Amino acid sequence: MKKNVLENDDQLKDVLKIDKTADSDSSDFKVSEQELRSQIESEDQALIDIENDKMRTPKTMRDVRCLIFQFMYAMEQFDYSVSFESVIDNFRRGFNLEIPDDFIAIKIARDTIAKREELDAKITPLLKNWKIDRLGCCTLLILRLAMWEFENNKDTSAAIIINEAIELAKSFGEKNSYKFINGILDEAIKSLNLPNTKTEKVNASGE
């Protein structure tokens, strides 16, 4: 039976441990559940420390994107068997986050998660010799977020969106996943015929 609430805050923190170790000869960036839930050394963790003061209330869009990614990652690792609201509530308690329900990170994460199948359908043709189920979790989530931004964040240039996706990949993904993501998103802006001249105007408060 699927559950719609998390049992405790530690359960969320356990899920948010991302193991970056992978076979360097493999192009598959999947993170196994066994690795994910094991106790790994702090230097091997890619989780951005949102328990420190500056991350309790994200100030920049880069911080916001990191938080969006972590919301998406938690939902993915729970196989969408818990409610999004449950994840957000546990983030607030477990990481002492001060974010309202209408905070931009929550709104974007919710919409990206809701449209994940639609976004995957747009990513798939860009993969060419790859199948989407071969992508590692972090890689796929970063691609979903970037594709969502291409369509919805009209105040930000495609170049900035790609650069931010690359930075997410460097923080959370397998060692060279950012190169793969860069290539896929380059193809995306060509296929979508996106303009590349605007600059980012939206701040963390969504204003």
Image: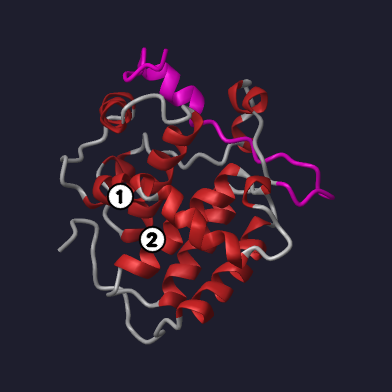
Q: Amino acid at mark 2?
A: Trp
Query: Magenta stretch: residue 13 in it?
Result: yes
Q: Are marks 1 and 2 in contact (CB under 8 Å)?
A: yes
The main secondary structure of the magenta stretch is: loop
**Span highlighted in magenta in the image:** 1-28
Task: Name the residue beneath numbered marker 1.
Answer: 111
x, y percent for residue 40: 64, 26
Task: Name the residue beneath numbered marker 2.
Answer: 148
- Dot 1 alpha-carbon crowd within 10 angstroms: few under 14, some 14 to 19, many 20 or more: few
Pick whichever, 72 or 169, lies toward us. Answer: 72
Pick whichever, 126 or 165, lies toward us. Answer: 126
Q: What colour-coding does the image apply? A: secondary structure
Point out the tag, 1 or 2, that comes first from the N-terminus. Answer: 1
Residue positioned 60% across, 67% down in the render: 126
Q: Is residue 4 above or below residue 120?
A: above
- Marks 1 and 2, Cα distance to the nearest angstrom? 9 Å
Residue positioned 34% across, 45% down in the render: 114
Residue positioned 42% across, 41% down in the render: 72
Q: Is residue 99 above or below residue 207?
A: above
Residue positioned 69% across, 66% down in the render: 128
Q: Is residue 207 above or below residue 199?
A: above
Query: Magenta stretch: residue 93 in it?
Result: no
